[in-house]
Amino acid sequence: MTVIQANAITQDLFDPYGQLLDIPRSSGRYDYAANLFSNRELASANLLLVQIEPSHSPIDIVAFERHPHSSQTFVPLEVSKYLVIVCPQAPSGEPDYFETAAFIVPGNAGINYNPGVWHHPLTVLGSLGSFAALVWEDGGSSDTEWIRMPKNCHLQVDI
């Protein structure tokens, strides 16, 4: 078993995977805060609302997902903190499991995954959490790709 230590998120650490949508330090409008993207003409923007039950440490990672044709944005509506678990793509196209990273995100910051980034489903810490999410979908099987962890690979996140 491999244990991954979760660290506080920063834009520098999260940069290979997407953008941290942190609250600006001064008043004003901040345009283009994320690199929103879709490469399919027939896909529609899907603004969805999700409520997630909290998880407790240690967190077992059993699967990863990605959205190969779209960015995916999560904006917290009511949550104390949450966990983002990502890993780079191996040359085979599958997740590079042993390079998995975990980030603790405060409840006042959102994230935007770049297209094709392998990630664990959003995990809420502490108490029930609700989010608005944005992804482009056409209802087809390539909206979201899932891959289960190999039986000989067991990852756990310690928070």
Image (cartoon, rainbow, N blue to C red):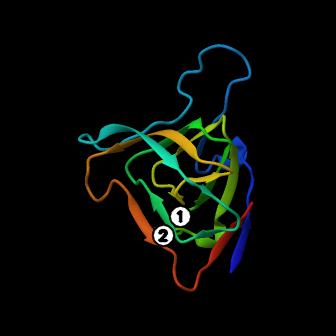
Quadrant location, the N terminus: bottom right
Residue type at mark 1 is Gln
Which quadrant of the figure has residue 145?
bottom left
Q: Position of residue 6 (x, y in %)?
A: 73, 58
Please state which of residues 99 and 84 is positioned toward the viewer in this rendering.
84
Please state which of residues 133 and 32 is positioned toward the viewer in this rendering.
133
Q: Which mark is residue 89?
A: 1
- Image: 64 above or below 13: below
Q: Residue at x 62, y 41 (%)?
A: 79
Q: Position of residue 88 (x, y in %)?
A: 57, 61
Left or right of 46, for residue 66: right
Q: Position of residue 98 (x, y in %)?
A: 64, 72
Tally of numbered discs: 2
Residue at the extreme top of the image, as rendered: 28
Which quadrant of the figure has residue 144?
bottom left
Residue type at mark 2 is Glu
| Residue hosting label 2 | 94
Task: Name the element at disc 1.
Answer: loop
